[in-house]
Image (cartoon, rainbow, N blue to C red):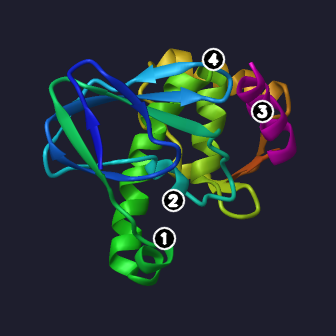
Amino acid sequence: MIKLNSNERYYLDGRFFLIKKGKIITKDILENGKIISNENCLREGEIVGNFFDFLKCQYLSVPKIDIEVEALEDTILEEFRFSQLEIINNIIFEKMLSQLIKKSTIKFLYQLYDTKGYILAILKLYANEKGIIPKKEISYENFNISKSQFYAIYSKLKDSEFLSMNKDEIKLNISKIDKYLNEFEQD
């Protein structure tokens, strides 16, 4: 049990907690020191932790994240232990959690990378294990940016050989993309 007074902060250190009493907000602290504040608060009965640890996407690495909570009122947290294996062995829970994490990851990536890196990271999420995406799956609407901005950056990505295209497919240069994205994790 962790007891926090109003405005007190606590680092989760990779653990998950059930909020037994009170209300908190969280901040994601990246290994490069960048802080991403979350705008929604969590209340009694909800679970807080780093759910990005469950994203085992071989095509996209999410940097190490530490979660800091701040109590908005007197709060009690109780450590919640569960096995990742238990969730993965339940295909329905694993797929539900995976989809929620991917949705959150996309919003997270927009804050982590510049626009070029954001597009590259999303393309990696769409790609199969060989780095190939059917062209019909990619549209500027998938990226929450303007059409002109998307196609200007997309054109530069082709010119810089981050990706290549044939009639039906987009082929990603995964090693070049990874090198570019890793630069942000180091900053």
Amino acid identity at mark 4:
Ala
Residue in the picture at 62% in, 18% down: 114
Question: Is residue 140 visible from the viewing direction of this image?
Answer: no
Residues in magenta, as a range: 174-187
Mark toward the start of the polypeptide (1 vs 2): 2
- Magenta-drawn stretch contains 117: no
How far across and how far down the image is residue 28, in percent? Answer: 47, 30
Amino acid identity at mark 3:
Asn
In screen coordinates, is 174 left or right of 146?
right
Pointer 4: what residue? 152
Q: Are marks 1 and 2 in contact (CB under 8 Å)?
A: yes
In screen coordinates, is 137 left or right of 179?
left
Pointer 3: what residue? 182
**Residue 155 disc label:** none
Q: Are marks 2 and 3 in contact (CB under 8 Å)?
A: no
Pointer 2: what residue? 54
Amino acid identity at mark 1:
Gln
Query: For the residue carrying disc 1, how many other residues have a C-alpha within 10 Å: few (<14), some (14-19), or many (20+)?
Result: few
Q: Do the residues labelled 4 and 1 touch (CB within 8 Å)?
A: no
Residue in the picture at 28% in, 24% down: 39
Mark toward the start of the polypeptide (2 vs 3): 2
Pointer 1: what residue? 84
Residue in the picture at 51% in, 59% down: 54
Mark toward the start of the polypeptide (4 vs 2): 2
How far across and how far down the image is residue 103, in percent? Answer: 39, 46
Mark toward the start of the polypeptide (3 vs 4): 4
Quadrant where the image shows the C terminus: top right
Q: Image height check: is 18 above or below 69?
A: below
How far across and how far down the image is residue 25, in percent? Answer: 28, 28
Residue in the picture at 47% in, 76% down: 88
